[in-house]
Image: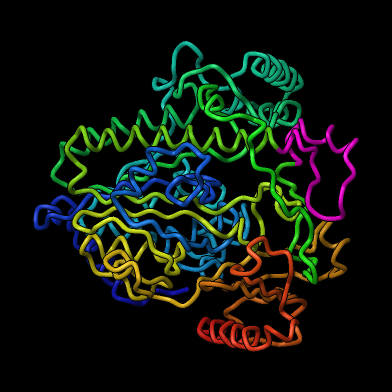
Amino acid sequence: MKFSSLSTSLIIVLFSFGVSSTLLAQKSNKPNILFIAIDDLKPILGCYGNTQIKTPNIDRLAKMGTVFMNNYCQQAVCGPTRASLMTGMRPDVTKIWDLKTKMRDVNPDIISLPQYLITQGYSTQGIGKVYDPRCVDADIDKPSWSVPYYKTNKKYYDPTFGPPALERYQLASTKVLAEKYISEALASGKTKTEANDYAALKVKPSVESADVSDNAYNDGANVLQANDLLAQLSKKDQPFFLAVGIAKPHLPFIAPKKYWDLYNRADMPIEKYQEKSKNSVDVAYHNSGELRAYTDIPPLLSFTDQKPFGLTLPVDKQQELIHGYYAAISYTDALVGKLLHTLDSLGLSKNTIVILWGDHGWHLGDHNLWCKHSNFEQAAHAPLIIAAPGIAASKTKSQSEFIDIFPTLCDLAGVTIPTHLNGKSLVPIMKNPLATVKEFSVSQYPRSSDGVETDRQGYAEARVMGYSIRNKQYRFTIWMKDSFRSYQPFKKELVIGTELYDYKNDPLETVNVVADKKYTTVSNDLYKSMLAFFKSQVK
């Protein structure tokens, strides 16, 4: 896609004439931006109404900013949704629908948020998982950063424990096994990377509770390094955009023992509805393959009757996983607290926009599903909190989506919003939580013609994409075959299934009511909205 808009012209002019970002900064008093990305964090936070989770630091941030209660991701998997968020463009524009395509290989002219902010006088720096590294270059999208992207520095690890095994585990027994398999692989002639991959096939537990410090794990070490970066940036006149990615609560569910101790395993909330929705569309489901890859899962399947969809786990394992997910969220919350404390101690809070987001939701057994990878509510609904100087705290039920972050931060920073962006500024909602900037949010999810999906669906040559629109009460999803994308003319014969869920009367999505006569008007209206959306995307 070519960007012939104001933003592209501005970037060309600034770089061509060598206008330095420092010079630009001296002519303005722009706010700093602390950009906190959290992996696989669904909105089960205190500020979102969950009374069981322990998230005092994120809740403190919420009391300073706007909590977007009805925020949705573009595609419920890391690479695509992060590419969309960072560029303000939908997956059908970025052309990132998987975890292997490099964003600038397929869309070299695309402009990222930090890349644009460089032209507006910002120093842009990052550490941790912000982009999915599989979808960008080895420099974590080199055009996005003023300085080389920071890697985890070993000096920030707790010296008592040293770096984690396989970049994940600290339990001594797991470390011993990992070292055994790595040595075995190296002795057979494998490279170091191949040896690590081999060891991960042999020892990869889905949970870990170790009596270690916060910085025994990568996230804790990265946050300590990020605090030092904040200290360095605070001494400069130039406004900064600092992106800090926290990998937890992504699998494996790992956290220091003290965070596990915050919860009672027996109190973990098992999902009430673990079945397929009545009248549902088969292609909407998956087999929870990400979780199946952990080495403690296959043994459970040998004595647990499996349904023909999702992943059926014993109740005790479900509670262990949910316990681990909650513990990992509380660990993440503590790390967020360290960043906020550093902002305060450096005197940066009054002139810093703080944004916190989780890239998508996560299934914890609903519909017999685990992980993300769907258009259902538990996968598409994602947290978003933005605190900005001069704007009162609030909660809003107005619709928002991740493509809105790019224009919102530009608006808050007082810089021109590029005209090519797919999203809209949320500042009107931040100033008035009853305001609206859009009637619905759009998510999508692809289904391939590979393996189990081909066998189950019978679409041997099809490449299926499900598009889902979510408004205040309903979700309408349409599944299209033959590699349809929203920028193509719509053809009714490509539709292989539709869904409609009413969250006011059926919050657990137990019944697809798209064919229910009582919902005819709603179905027709949302179908027209979907067609209008498709039409708006055709170039």
Identified at 88% across, 39% down, the residue is 304
Q: Position of residue 275 (x, y in %)?
A: 79, 57
Q: Is residue 224 above or below residue 418?
A: above
Q: Is there any visible trace of residue 109 in the rendered image?
A: no
Q: Position of residue 264 (x, y in %)?
A: 61, 29
Q: Is residue 419 above or below residue 379?
A: below
Q: Position of residue 130 (x, y in %)?
A: 45, 47
Q: Position of residue 507 (x, y in %)?
A: 63, 63
On whether residue 365 falls in the magenta region, the answer is no
On whether residue 301 falls in the magenta region, the answer is yes
Q: Is residue 278 left or right of residue 534?
A: right
Q: Residue furthest left?
A: 27
Q: Is residue 173 left or right of residue 226?
A: right
**Quadrant of res 126:** top left
Look at the image and give the residue range highlighted in magenta: 292-318
Q: Is residue 517 left or right of residue 120?
A: right
